[in-house]
Amino acid sequence: MLPYIENRTVVHFDLDTFFVAVERLKNSELNGLPIIVGGMSDRGVVAGCSYEARTFGVHSAMPMRMARSLCPDAIVIRGDMEQYTRYSNLVTDIIAEESPIYEKASIDEHYIDITGMDKFFGSLKWSHELRERIIRESGLPISFGLSVNKTISKIATGQAKPNGELQVVAPLVHEFLDPLSIAKIPGIGDKTYRLLRSMGIAYIQTLRQMPVEMVEQVLGKNGIIIWKKSNGIDHSAVEPYSERKSISSETTFEQDTINIPMINDILLKMVEKLSFQLRSKKKLTSCVTVKVRYANFDTHTLQHRIPYTAFDHVLLPVVRSLFDRLYSRRMLIRLIGIKFSHLVSGVQQINMFDDEPETISLYQAMDRIRNRFGVKAITRAAAIGHNEDEDNPNLFKV
């Protein structure tokens, strides 16, 4: 056992070219062709692409104009988050049924802690059979990496792709990591990568052998985390996934009311604030719940599942529709509440699929203002003048 390497067993599953794979399930004629999923206009962005398109230099987050130029024969498909959410949930349901402890890290990847499985079944065999079941029941290609912690298993998954499996046992962790590019380390973004490359650091082995104090001096506190990962050290736990994880807000009125226009305006303000919190924390929701408490303290809730999102203009109509269905008794209302649940990590994909980049630019501009001047610095005109008395507002709960 290498120093500091834990005696855990963690498997990381990642759906290969997820968006493209779903599109190919819908249309088998796309198999083997260069596919780009994203906004259809030249000002759109690539959300995902097939391996055939990647050979031309196309990659995610690339401007669509550039992608079309690099691969003019590619078939461009506008994304469908409703379909992707459905398949994501299907895979999660399979993993939940089989796994002791799992974490849904994003729409297309999961971590599973199977420490101790070797005593009863065999970690590699168990992971292989789970992968086979996912492929069989979903029709989607999926890869996994199996190792001693989340970092090594995630890197191993990347090396196993496409549609493969890779186990890295504890004694071979350094041997596995050393020849890889520093870009393979989770958490190294473009800016950090360029900085390290300017220092002549290209491979994980070089970074691993540097004094940790030097890495910290260059990269700050985050440098310690990156250095540890380069040494195969990652003590972070697989966080059990819970559908109860949510972000919520409630408003109790000073006087019971049936002023529906005012209530709709307050619902708007609550949606704005919660959506901003989702985007700030890089979270997406797929379930909306609205609560109404009447003057006699009767409390009623309704919820609705939706494609993963973090944007006001998608969530607000759902909230208002649920409220309209709830408020059928025409009684005075004491409290209203909103909860966004079934959260996963991820960046909203609407910017990849929407043909109106002005919408995305507007959200980005509003979020910059809120980050600089506070959440109340900018809002829609309808929400001005209404203040909520919130109980535990904007709090992530487990």
Image (tube, rainbow, N blue to C red):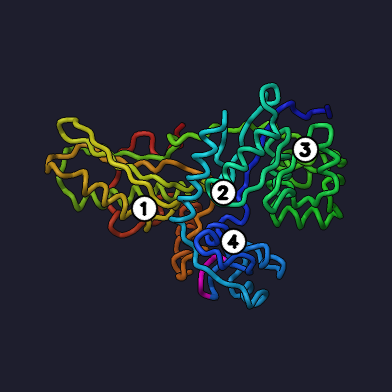
Identify the amino acid type marked 1.
Leu
Q: Is residue 353 left or right of residue 325?
A: right
Residue furthest top as drawn: 119
| Distance between the alpha carbons at the discs numbered 3 and 2 | 22 Å
List the residue tagged with mark 3: 168
List the residue tagged with mark 4: 48
Where residue 203 sits in the image (x, y, percent)? 84, 50
Q: Which mark is residue 108?
A: 2
On the question of residue 374 being in view, the answer is no
The image quarter in which residue 253 lies: top left
Query: Which numbered disc, 3 or 2, marks the residue that appears first in the sequence?
Result: 2
At mark 3, the secondary structure is loop
Magenta segment's dominant SS is: loop
The magenta stretch is 37-41
Q: Residues within 10 Å of mark 1 (few under 14, many from 20)?
A: many
Identify the amino acid type marked 3.
Val
Magenta stretch holds residue 38: yes
Q: Is residue 393 above or below residue 197?
A: above
